Image (tube, rainbow, N blue to C red):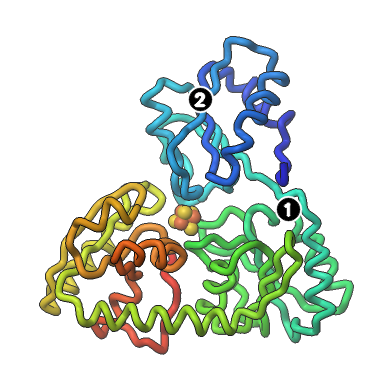
Amino acid sequence: MDFIIDIDDLNTKLEDRGWERIGLQFPEGLKPFAGKVIRALREGLGDENIEFIVSGSSCYGACDVSDKEFLKVEADGMIHFGHAEIPAIRGNYHIPVIFIEMQADVDATMVVKKALDSGLLKGVIGLTTTVQFVHELPDMQNLLERRGKDVRIGIGTDRLAHPGQVLGCSFSSALAVPDTDVHLFVGEGLFHPLGIALATGKPVIAADPRSRELKDLEEEKNKVLKQRFGVIQKLKDSGDIGVVLSTLPGQKRMELATSLLRKGRDKGKNMNLITASHLNPMSLRNIGAEVFVSTACPRVAIDDYSLFLEHGIVMATPIEFLIAIGEMKWENYVLDTID
Ligand code: SF4
């Protein structure tokens, strides 16, 4: 397994709680390890009467806790693996939840060394990462400082559990350190560093600890901006627009959705509200809107853009809609966030 879970600590927590029917929720990438985790928990607890139930539903992130699902099958409590709890929604669950963050079993300082040697890190550095590598932030910071760098790790909003952490819906830790010249994002994928680049307007270097690849985000940013400009034109030309409202507690933005409906109607657009827990193109494609504006997870419109487009669906963000109706300027374009 590429991740480390402290099974002994988890077993102690479970012994303290005395649960007998326990729900387990894993993000997609970790579901293959469910069997291994259950075996380790059984061995540690040594109690044959404990029943573990694995959620087979999809799991988007820490905003998508399957407490209601496990309540229906009378679980005493549940464990949500892989994500840090979102402080802003802490306690809003129907059964007790233990969050187990999974730490990547990779030495992230190796790619930080590579970034240092590349000469790309000039001036004051803003350091960010995702929850899988957040435990390595002190080592990364030490390494950078030993090489004479001035490093800033920002504390974001209560959407984020850790200083320096970013989520696809919050880059607030990067915004909390405005006096930086460059941001170093250590983690996988390009969505988070793209969000940081657009939110801060500063150069961003993405350093992937597994592949040890470095990427300057400038080119990717321009590519995505070109695509999003096209989406805004489509919104301008469309008469029928669907506003998608997520029913997941950590994604539900009712006020935003209703304000978009009102603003669109004031501009003469035919606006309809559509609810969904998990968005998928097959369920949306027959609804008949020309363009959808997603107030759900901000990643949907950007990361899954091509997936929706394959089914003839154009998915936009609330910010793109506001630009299309003249309430925001294109020059101020940023990714949508939930902060
Ligand atoms: S809203 Fe999206 S990015 Fe934010 S926690 Fe949920 S799944 Fe992750």
Disc assigned to residue 135? 1
Q: Label 2 is placed on what type of residue?
A: Ile
147 versus 212 height, above or below:
below
Measuring from the top left, give residue 22's x and y in whole percent: 53, 24
Residue 261 figure quarter: bottom left
Residue 91 horizontal/vertical position (percent): 46, 40
Q: Quadrant of residue 4?
A: top right
Q: Residues within 10 Å of mark 2 (few under 14, many from 20)?
A: some
What amino acid is labelled 1 in the image? His
The quarter of the rendered structure image containing the C terminus is bottom left
Q: Secondary structure at mark 1?
A: helix
Mark whose residue sits in front, 1 or 2: 2
Can residue 276 be seen here? The reply is yes
Residue 339 visible in rendering: no
How far across and down, in percent of the image, does residue 284 sit?
26, 55
Q: CA distance from mark 1 to mark 2?
A: 29 Å
Q: Which residue is mark 2?
A: 53
Residue 68 picture location, percent across and down: 38, 33
In screen coordinates, is 237 left or right of 120?
left
Kindly identify the residue that appears in the image at 14 percent across and 74 percent down: 269
